[in-house]
Image (cartoon, rainbow, N blue to C red):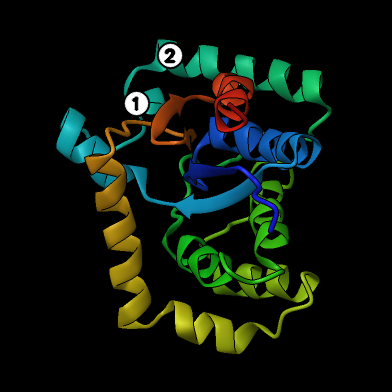
């Protein structure tokens, strides 16, 4: 029985750097023969508890925000990812996060994750709109309504809340993060280090 190393990817659909990190992880993990474990969570509760703010730090601190948007443009150009600055930032990501948890063990899960990030950061679509989410599921070959119904359930609400709490307990304070063999790597620029650690 062969063993493939695992790499947990903790991400937030509203996070700009998660867009780059997730897209890079999908390519990098395939090349390295590492299995990705998808862990969507919500940054909002962490920012409230850790920083005492109700918004993205990039909005609270405009100087950081200006740098981030330009940095994101450079990164997308570097890696060949399409980019269109969203007219709303950050977008509400509760529904898509719950759907991603439903899809975490399904073949369509990675395609859905990629499509949501593309909708948000390449097409400027409202990812909190159920009709947009349904359209993305349809593009992934999934019948939308049963998945959306499950995503709205108390069970999925509890799962997303628990996963967000777990992120805090792991010492996560931003996104994306990669965990390899219990080692935490923060930021899309630490992906290669995380993959190397998983392969040790």
194 sits to left or right of 177: right
Q: Nearer the viewer, residue 77 or 21?
A: 21
- In the image, taking residue 128 as reference, residue 110 lies left or right, namely right
Answer above or below: position of 44 versus 157. Answer: above
Q: Give residue 182's position: percent from left, percent from top.
A: 39, 36
The reply to whether residue 54 is visible in this rendering is no
Say which residue appears at 84% left-offset and 28% top-offset.
80
Indicate which disc, 2 or 1, sits on the residue closer to the N terminus: 1
Residue at image location 57% in from the left, 89% down from the top: 146
Identify the secondary structure beneath mark 1: helix
Tell me whether circle 2 and circle 1 mark residues in contact (CB < 8 Å): yes
Q: CA distance from mark 2 to mark 1?
A: 8 Å
Residue farthest along the right direction in this orientation: 80
Counting from the top left corner in percent of width and height, residue 162 is at 27, 60
- The percent position of residue 185, horizontal first and vertical second, equals 46, 25
Left or right: where does residue 118 sit relative to residue 100?
right
Residue that carries the numbered disc 2 in the rendered image: 64
Residue at image location 62% in from the left, 24% down from the top: 196
Image quadrant where residue 64 sits: top left
Residue 86 is drawn in which quadrant?
A: top right
Q: Quadrant of the N terminus?
A: bottom right
Depth check, front residue: 129 or 160:
160
Q: Nearer the viewer, residue 13 or 25?
A: 25
Circle 1 crowding by C-alpha within 10 Å: few under 14, some 14–19, many from 20: few
- The total number of labels drawn is 2
User: Residue 128: x, y in percent?
Assistant: 51, 62
Checking the image for residue 57, the label placed there is 1
When asked about the image quadrant of residue 60, the answer is: top left
Q: Residues within 10 Å of mark 2 (few under 14, many from 20)?
A: few
């Amino acid at each position: 029985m062969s063993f493939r190393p695992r790499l947990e990817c903790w991400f937030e659909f509203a996070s700009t750097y998660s867009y780059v990190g997730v897209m890079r992880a999908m390519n990098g993990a395939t090349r390295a023969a590492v299995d990705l474990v998808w862990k969507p969570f919500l940054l909002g509760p962490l920012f409230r508890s850790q920083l005492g703010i109700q918004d993205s730090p990039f909005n609270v601190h405009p100087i950081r925000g200006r740098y981030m948007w330009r940095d994101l443009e450079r990164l997308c150009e570097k890696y060949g990812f399409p980019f269109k600055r969203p007219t709303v930032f950050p977008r509400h990501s509760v529904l898509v996060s719950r759907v991603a948890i439903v899809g975490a063990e399904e073949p369509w899960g990675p395609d859905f994750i990629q499509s949501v990030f593309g909708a948000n950061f390449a097409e400027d679509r409202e990812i909190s709109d159920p009709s947009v989410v349904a359209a993305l599921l349809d593009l992934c070959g999934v019948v939308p309504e049963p998945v959306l119904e499950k995503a709205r359930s108390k069970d999925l609400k509890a799962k997303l809340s628990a996963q967000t709490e777990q992120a805090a307990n792991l010492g996560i304070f931003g996104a994306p993060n990669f965990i390899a063999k219990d080692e935490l790597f923060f930021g899309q620029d630490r992906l290669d280090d995380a993959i190397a650690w998983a392969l040790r």
